[in-house]
Amino acid sequence: MAKTEYMLQTESVIKQYRQSDSVITAVNRVNIKIEKGEFVAIIGSSGSGKSTFLHICAGLDRANAGRILIDNEDITKMSADKLGRFRGEKMGFIYQKHHLIPQFTALENILLPTVMCNKSDSSYQESLRELVECLGLSERLHHLPSELSGGQCQRVAIARALINNPQILFADEPTGNLDRTNADEVLRLLLKIRETRGQTLMMVTHDLDIAAKADRIFRMDNGVLSLDRDYIGGNKKTVDSY
Amino acid sequence: MLEKIWEYLSRHIKIAFKSVFFNFKQYCCFFAAIFIIQLLFGMMAISSTNNNTVAYQQIEEEYKYHYVIRNLTQGQYNFLVDYGGETNAVGITDKNRQTYYILTEEIDGIGPIERLNVKENKYEYDVFIRFGKLSREDGSMADYETVKKHCERFETHYVSKLMSIEPGYTYQNYSVERTLLLDYESRVAANNATFAVIAGLLLVLSVFLLTSIYNIRMNQYKFTYGVYMTFGADFKMLFWTAFWEMFVIMLTTFIPAALVSTLVVFLIYLPSGFKFAFDITMILLLFVFSTVVVLASVFMPMRVTSFRHPMSLIVTEDNSNLVTSPRKSFNLLGKSFPGHYEMYSLWRFRKYNIQLLTSAIIFCALFICGLYLANIYTTDLDYPRAQYTLEINTENTTAAYDTILSNSIREINEDFRTEFKDELEEYGIAEDFNAITGIEATGNAKPAAEETDPASKQSPTTEAMYIQSFMLVNRKDVKPLSTGFIVYDTEDAETPYQGTESYKVTNKVVYKAVDYNNYQDLFDFLSQYEIEGDITKILESTPEKQYVIVGDSISNISKFNFEEGDQIVLSTFVNAVLAIDSNVTGTNLLRNQIKRFRYDFTEFEVCAVIKDIPSGSVPVYIINDPGSPSQNRAENLAYEKVTGRDATTTKLNIYTYDAKYGEKDVFQMNDEHITFIENSLRQMVSDDNASKVGSIVITDLNQLAENNIKEDEHYNELYIAISILILCISPIIWFFSQTLYYFKREKEFNIIQSMGANGSDIRKIYLIGGLSMSVLSLIVSIVLSFLGSYLMFYAYNVIVPNFSGEYVRYTFYMPWYALAIAIVMSVGCGFFSAYIPYKSYFKNRYSLENGGGGKDDE
């Protein structure tokens, strides 16, 4: 039997916040293993710690304890600089709010990760063409974010997250700020590209319909992650360990 | 390779251009700050070039000769003078067969000095040498580079041979002095060193300023860097991104700054009448300096940012990161709104407010420091300094100043008045003008251990420390918190002084003899200072009732409350009962001396206090009167009794009249006057007194020339210009920081309005915020200004003299007009930096209510 290759593994990840005299545990000893190419959704109520966990997995925030392995590399042991470079090469991130840089056009925002990773002009042309075409942005490339609709901004944000062709994509409620039609369209495009490229996707969402499209669904409750059995079935995979 | 570099540069500079000009409001203060920094550096760099040019032109005008060779024997003198044959000059021919002459006989009225060494009964000579062009008759100056080229040859070929002439002569101790005319490079080096130091300080200041502003910006716009880091930016990338942004700003301001600084320096130097010097390398240096400042100033903010997690940067879109989390919450219930509300907000944002107040107002304090420096420079320039020194070689003569020279020197003033009667009459001072304004006996006795012969004990001044002596002062006469004293405990003393009072002790005292035969010179010298009491009373001293004139300061800091009639006690070392470890120093040494040495004590009454005399140790003037049977005056050698030293004066400082060079309608000494005095002094030595006085060396310290050069270097005006520019930095910080701060608080104001607050409440919030910052600014301005001024005062009065050895007394004062400007600036900025955002807030609201467009929060 072939050995399973994991894109993301976490071991006993803990994140606590100190507030005045009390300590709040946002993420409590979370273990998860995500295979390469897998789509995992995390659901849970507000304040349950799901976004915090996603940020920690993406190296955008630090855990107080535990290990996080991305493609078998422990990011908790990396220096800030190494982690930055690693993030640029292997990960993509989509925020709930698009977080586009207002002074840059859509194209410049999309190309921002290539600049941050010092990629040569020739290295991303193919990826750019593909993304622009797929996301329907070709007419809006030279517009500023303030001249784009919410859905278009989010599509630019998706293109920005994918331009460096990352192995794993983190999405923090990527359609949370959009109406249903726009949300469905953005999600459809995201999943289409992911499928084409075979990328791993870890998504935090409130939307059960979106979560239903995932290979596995987890529920975060008071910092504790558990497999949400209510949604397992049909063509969804089951997990043997997490 | 080049393609890659071009791709990199074009990409990053394009991003930087977009960032800077799209968010111009965010960056406009950087334009102002970098422009001011470039202006400051440009002014200093261009003025440094000008100073070198001005200095050389002035030196050429002021100095008459390249070399002074002193104490030549007759043979050596003849060797130098006769070598040139009939022309009486030594010719040097270079490879182009161009001949330069060394003029030795007479240069602009100053000729060689001949004087008799009475012990050897031989003549000695001082020769003044100038390199002339082509012929002695021409006499014009050879250019500096040519002179430099030939002086080495002159020293090798001629000067080095002097020793072999008359080898048997006992007193063959000629000395070769180069004047600034030849050592111009040392002046340039000094100017360049000054420039380097100031540039270094400016670098630190500039980096501090830009880092402060950058931190303010970072606090408000961390979000962007959070996004950059999300997509792979490490420190290197963040650093270069920030650098290119600043570089774009620097590039934009570079040419205007270079032009304006050139213009300002040109206007400052215009009145001096010298040709304006412009050096393109200084402009290049300005570019390099600006680049270094920009590189250094983004380093720390980016380094700190790179250690943060992207999420912590992204979530601080509002100014929640500026709020200090309270340990204990205030109870808002029952409190007034918006008064207490805003006061609590001020408290919650305390870190931000403190940072803002100090970083903005520190530049107001620096402005005051700059003006203080300008004042110190002017004081320094006007400070009385000796023009000549007279040194009497006691090995060659039996004569001394007090018996022979005193009257002769005073006669020079009369000769001067006669010689320049017409000129002096124009200013109405023909009757009472004194060209020589003061004569000061100097020279300090060596430490006791270094005294090898009686001659070394000849000195009219003696440091108490050198002779293990100290001064007992009534405790009430020592100002509170004065350091460097120990309490005198009779039980601890080997030979206790049994006085009626409680005493403090110091050995930072210098004893100075008042020679009864020559007191008028000293009184003239002292009269330039502020005196309380009657200095002439010291002449009434008798062995039974001794008077002293005392200073009130140690290291230029006033430490005594002396009044006329106070008593002091001076100790004279007798012998040591127990030895003291050589490692013991300072007050411990003094304590041990009191404990282990035997002393005699002499009581003195203070007859006068000199309030502003520059001092390392406190001066105590003691009578030294050989007595006069004809005047029925008994001998009273109090100075010699206390110090054990012979008060004979062998070294003198001679002060000449020195009006402020730039002032009109004031008689000013020129080269002709100084030459007259110098020749008169030399005449005095070589004429009738020669056989009695013997060897006296007169050294021209060129103080007048020095003052003229310094005056034309315009440091005073530069310091003022620099101070004004520094002051301009303060409002930049104020408005930049506060505008962003209030912009971020607009959401808060919208929320409290939705909960019932009306427009008037919001106005009050802005008003209270502005007024509170104004009041705090007032306090911080006064504190920082006084602190800055005192630090400058302390540095120049105490620290600098420790290195330079020259004590100039500066008075501590607060430049009130500058303080007023600083306060108005701080208070005004504190208020208006809140008022203008308030106006903008209501203007935006009004436009919104009338269907105006919104704005992007980011």
Image: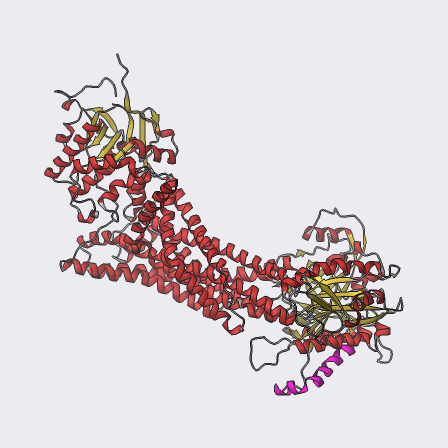
Residue B369 in view (yes/no): no
What colour scheme governs how the chains and residues are painted in the rendered image of this protein? secondary structure
B713 vs B7, left or right, is right
Residue B114 position (above or below residue B845): below
Give percent across and percent down for residue B440: 72, 71
Give percent across and percent down for residue B454: 85, 61
Q: Nearer the viewer, residue B282 or B39?
A: B282
B212 vs B706, left or right, is left
Residue B809 in view (yes/no): yes
Residue at the extreme top of the image, as rendered:
A1
Q: Nearer the viewer, residue A190 or B123?
A: B123
Q: Residue at x 26, y 32 (%)?
A: A165
Q: Is residue B620 magenta?
A: no
Quadrant in which residue A187 is drawn: top left
Residue B366 position (above or below residue B324): below
Q: Which residues are magenta?
A: B406-428
Give percent across and percent down for residue B721: 46, 66
Quadrant in which residue B772 is drawn: bottom left
Residue at the extreme left of the image, as rendered:
A181
Which quarter of the image is occupied by the N terminus of chain B?
A: top left
A37 vs B414, left or right, is left
The rendered magenta stretch, by its main secondary structure, is classed as helix
Q: Nearer the viewer, residue B402 or B164?
A: B164
B507 vs B215, left or right, is right
Give percent across and percent down for residue B683: 78, 76
Q: Nearer the viewer, residue B612 or B160?
A: B160
